[in-house]
Amino acid sequence: MTAEVAARRAPNQLALPADDSTKGLFAGCMARGMMRSLRTTLAVLLLVTARSSAAEDVVVYTSVDEIFARPIARGFEAESGITVRLVPDTEETKSTGLVNRLIAERARPQADVFWSGDPVRAAVLARKGVSAPYRSPQADGLPAQFSDPNGHWTGFSARARVLIYNRTLVPEGQTPTSVMDLLAPRFLGKACLANPLFGTTSMHAAALFAVLGDDKARALFESFTTNGGRMLSSNGEVRRRVANGECAVGITDTDDANVARLEGKPIGVVFPDADGIGTLVIPNCAVLIAGAPHPAAARRFVDYLLRPETERALAQSAAAQMPLRAGVPVPAGVVPLAQLRPMQVDYGVLAQLLETLSRGYLKDWVDRANSGR
Amino acid sequence: MKHADLELRGVSKHYNARLALDDISLRVEPGDHTAMVGSSGCGKSTLLRMVAGLEAPSSGQVLLGGEVASDTQRIILPPHRRGIAMVFQDLALWPNLSVLENVLLGLGGTECSKAQRALRAIDALALCGIPDLADRKPGTLSGGQQQRVALARSLAVRPAFLFLDEPFAGLDPVIKAKLLREIMALAGEHAFTIVLVTHDPFEANELCTMGVLLDGGRATERGKLVDLVRESSSEILSSFRQRLGGWAGALT
Amino acid sequence: MISSLALERPGRWRAGGIGLLLGLIAAPDVLLLWRALGDGAAGAVGWSFVQAIGRSACIAGIAGLVGLMCGLPLGVGTALYRFRGRALLLALVTLPLLVPSFLWGIGWSSLAAALGVPFLLSGLPACVLVFAAGLVVPLVLLTAYAATAALTGSQIDAARLAGGEREVVWQASRNASAPALLAAALGGVLTLVDPGPGQIFGEQTAASEILTSFAALYDFGLAGRQCAVLAGLVLVGAVPLALLATARFANDLLAKQTRRAVPVTHERLAVLMVGALAMLTTAATILPTLGLLLPMVAGGPELLTWTARDPFQMNHPELVLFGAAAEVGRTAANSFLYAGGAALVAMLLGIGAAVCVGRFPRLRAAWLAATLALFCVPPALPALGIVALATSSPAWADALLRSRLTVCVALGLRLVPVSSVIALRAWASTSPSWAMAAALHGVPLHRYAARVLVPVLRPAVGVGLLLVALLASADIATVLLVHPPGESSLPLAIVTVMANAPEMLVSALCLVYIAGAAAMLGGLWVLSGAAEA
C-alpha cells in the first residue's frame, strides 16, 4: 500500500482487502485459482478413472450369494496369484441384476466368468450368445445331466429346493413331506413361498409344470392361493417368516435353510417328494464369457470352480451345497446327492418353459396374488 | 470520460407486444440537472437503462457528445465507457462484499492503477461521509448508509452523468434532505449532471432545474422545472404544484 | 469483454443450452428406448402394467400429499425457530434419504412381525408409510427449510409486524410452497421407480412390473416400452404442475434486503417442533431401525459370533461387527466418491440449467416438466444405456465409460432434476440489478461471477450437494450395473450380502451404515451451524 493511500485511510479502518483489485490482480488471482482448480480436478479425474491393475486379474460376475462366493475367490487368489475382481449380484427382486449387465456388455464384455447359482440364468446367457463353450478338464466326474450338452455351462455343487417348517408350530407327526402338503388344510393360511417370477422359485415353478403337466401345476398354484398361502418377496423372507413363526411352512433353498439352522432358529428341513416326483436339484454353473478380456485366467478360474476341492469347500461352508461328484466328503447336516431322489428335468428346456410361463400363467398368478391382498 | 451532452432521437422500446417508450426525443445539456417525472410504469426507469446502455432501443438513437452510443437494437458504446453512473432503485449493492469492496469492484472498468483505485475508493467513501463503514457488509447498514454506499460507488468512477432512479424512497426526511444537499454540492464540485427519476416534488425541486414529463411512454412535456410545475395541467405536475404550493416561493 | 448482463438477457442460447442439457441427461435413456420402440410389438406393455400404473399413481399421490402436509410446516418451522436439538433432529430426519427404501420396508415388516401385527403393515398403506416417512417428507422438509432460510430479515420482520407469528409462518409457508410442491412431486416420481416396498409388502406397482421385465423376462424391449409409457404419463401430469409452481417459484430479491433472517426462540412453537420432528424421526428412522436390529438383540450372546468356515483353513469364529466393519472398510472410499462425484456432476448441470433458464417462466416450466418426466425412468434404463454405450465404444474410452467416473456421472445425470430445482430457486433469488450495476461499472462476467454470484449461491449449492449426495448413496440399481468390477459401494455391498447372510451380519452392516451416515450428517450440520455463527 502506498504512503498516500495509507495517509488517506481513516485511523480506525482495517487494512485494505488483500485483493483490492486491479485488472491484473484479479486476473492473476483468478488465474492462480483456476490453475489450482484444474490441478485438483485432474488429480481427482485420475483417481476416479484409474483402475487398479494387478499383474493379472480375472473378473467374475456371480449370482451366488456373496458371503459364499468370496471365500472361494480368496482361495483362488491365494493359490494362483491372480486377483479376482468379484461382482456379486443382488436378489432379483431388489434390482435389475447382473444378467442384464452381461447381456448389455455382450459385444465387449468386462466379465471373464459368470458363476451362476442356477442353470436358468446360464441357459439365458447361452441363448443370447453371451457365453462360450468350454469343457474343463476338471469337469471329470461331474454328472452330465447337470451340465449343458453343448458345453456352455457346467454344473457343480448344488442346492436343492426344500420344505422348511417351524418346529414349535408343526408337531413331529405332521411335518410336510411333499410340495402338495403346502395345500393341506392343517397349513391353512400358514404356508409361504417366494415370488415365482424370480430366482430359484421360478425355476421350481417351471420344473413343476414340466413334471406335473400344465393342468396339475396350475391346480397346485390355484389351490395354494385358495388355502391362504402367502407369496413373499424372496427365499430369504420365507426363511425369516418361518423362523419367527409367522408362517408354519415354506419352500426355499438348502442354503437358506442352513443359514437358519446355524442361527439356531427352530426350523426343520425336508427334501420333498422323495417317493414321488423328486426334489429339484439346482446346480451352480460355471460359464465362460465369450470374448472374455482375460481368457487364460478365466479358464483357470473355471477349472478351479469345478475341482472336487471346491465342491468340498462349498459343502463345508454355510451354503451346505451338495457335491455333484460322487465321493466328495460332506459334513453332517449336508445330504449327499446319492441320498436324494432328484427331480428328472432338462434344465435347458426349463429355461425356455420358464420364459413362456413368466409372460403367461405365472405373471397372471402373481398379479392375482398381489391384488388379492 | 466527459461528454458535452446527452441526446435521444426518436427512441422507442418494445417488450413483445407492449410499447414501453414511444418516440422519445430530448436533450440534456451539461449542468442541466433534469427530473424525470411520471406515473408508475410510464417508462422512466426503462429510459434510464436505455441511455446507460443496459438495454438497446427497439428504434432510435442515443447520442453522447454528438456520437451515437446506441442505435436500433444495437449497443455501440458499452455502458462503462459512457461516463454514466447510476444509483438503482434497489441500490444493487453486492451483498457479499464489504462497502470498500463494493466501491473497488465498481472501479474495475476504469483504466487506473491499483493504487489509484484504492485512493479513489477511499476518497469516494470520505466524500459520502462513510469512511468508517469500509469493512461493513451492506446488510448490516441502515437505509441511509446503504444509499451513501451506492452513491460512493457511483461517484468513484467520476461520471459525467449521475442517474438517480428513485433512490431515496423509504428514507426519513431529515436524512433525505441532508443527502440531497450533499449531492448538490458534489455535483457542483465535480461537475456532473444529475438525471433524477422521482415522484417526490421536493427531491425534484432540490436537485433539478429542468424537467421531463413522461406519460404512457411518451415525453409529453419538457422544459424548466419551475415552468412545468406552474403551468402544466397534467395530474402529476399539478400534484407537484399543490404539494409545493406552500413552498411556492422556493420554486426558482 | 463479456458483459455481466449476458446472463440476464434473453437469447437463443438459452433454449439451445436447455436442449443440450436435456439431451445429455436423456441420452442414456434414449439409447435403449430407441431400440425398445423399434422392437417388434410397439406399444404393447401389458394390461397388468396399466393396472400397476394406477396403483403406483395412488401411492405416489398419497405419499406426495403426506410429504407436503408434513414436510412443509416442519421445514418452515425448523428454519424460523431455534430450539434444542435442532441440528440433531434435522440430521436424523434427513437420514432415511441415505438408505435404500426396501431396507426400511424390511425393518417395518420385521418389527410388525415381532409385535404380532403383520397384517397392519401390508399393501398400499405400508408402501405409503415407507415412501412418505423415508423419502418424500425429508425431501420436502429440506427444500422448505432451504427456501425459508433464504428469506431476509426485512421480510420476516414485516410479516411479524403485520400479524405476529401466525403471519410469519403463513408468509414463510407461501414462500416455500412452490419449491416444496416440486420437491413433493420429485418424491412422488421417485416412488414410481422404486420397486422395493412394493415387492416387500406385496403391492403390484409399475416399478415392480418393469423390474419383472428386466430381471425375470430379460426383455429390454418390454421394459423400455413400459418406461416410455410411464415417462409420457408423468410428462402429461408434470406440465401443469410445473406451470403452477413456476408462477410462485421465487420472488426476486430486492437488492436492498440483504439482512439474513435469524431463527428466533419461541417456547410453545419450540415444543411443537421438537415433538413433531421427534415423531417423524421415530416413524422414519427409529422404528424401522429397531426392526432391522431385532435379530441382533433377539438371540443370546452366542449369536453374536458367526462361524465362517474358510475352505482352506480351520474354522475361524469372527465377530459379526468385525466382519461388518471390514465390509465398510472395503467400500467406504468408493461410497464417498460416488456420492460426492454424483453431487458435483448434478450440481454443475443444475447450475447450468439455472443459468440457461434465467428468469423466464416459460423456460422454467419447460425445464421442470421435462426433467420430472425423465426422473421417472427407472435407474436401470439409463444405466444399461451407459453400459451399451461403453460396450460399443473403443477400449481407450474405458477410462471415461467404464470407470468410477462413469458411476459418478451416471448417478449425477439421474439426479439433475433435484439439483436443478435447488439451483433454479437459488438463481431466481438473486437480483438482476446486481448484474446491471456490474455492467455499468465495467465488471466483466467472469469477475462478476467469481466475486458476487458464486459466493451468494454457495449456501444453496451446499444444500444441493448434500441432498444429491444423500440420494445418490441410496441408489444401488445404477451402481450395480455401472461400477467397475471390484469397486462396489457400501449400500450395494449390504444388498449383495443380505440375501443369505445371517440376519445378525445384515443387521450389523445396517447398524454400521446408519451410524456412519448419522455421524456424517451430524458433523455436517454442526459445521454449517458453526459457519453461520
Image (cartoon, grey):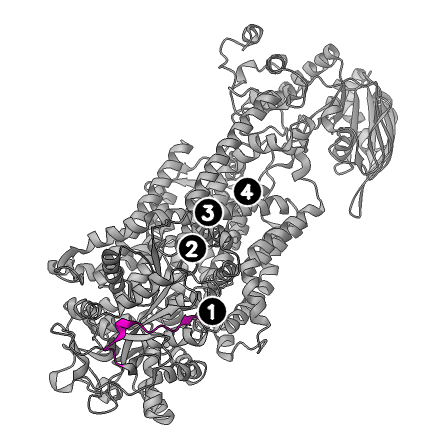
Q: Are marks 3 and 1 on the same chain?
A: yes
- The reply to whether discs 4 and 3 touch (Cβ–Cβ < 8 Å) is no
Residue A207 image point, x, y percent: 33, 85
Q: Secondary structure of the magenta portion, mostly?
A: loop
Question: Nearest the camera: C112 or C6?
Answer: C6
Q: Is residue C473 magenta?
A: no
> Where does label 1 land, which residue?
C56
Residue type, mark 1 in image: Ser
Q: Which residue is mark 2?
A: C137
CA gap, disc 4 and disc 3: 16 Å
Judged by depth in the image, the label closer to the viewer, 2 or 3, is 3
* Label drawn at residue C343: 3
Mark-to-mark CA distance, 2 and 3: 21 Å
- The first of marks 2 and 1 along the sequence is 1
Label 1 neighbourhood size at 10 Å, few (<14), some (14-19), many (20+)? many
Residue range highlighted in magenta: A130-143
Within 10 angstroms of label 4, few (less than 14), some, or many (20 or more) residues? Answer: many
Between discs 1 and 4, the one toward the N terminus: 1
Q: CA distance from mark 1 to mark 4?
A: 32 Å
At x 42%, y 33%, the residue is C532
Residue B96 in the image, given as x and y percentages of width and height: 53, 29
- Looking at the image, is mark 4 or mark 2 earlier in the sequence? 2
Q: Are marks 2 and 3 on the same chain?
A: yes
Q: Chain of mark 2?
A: C
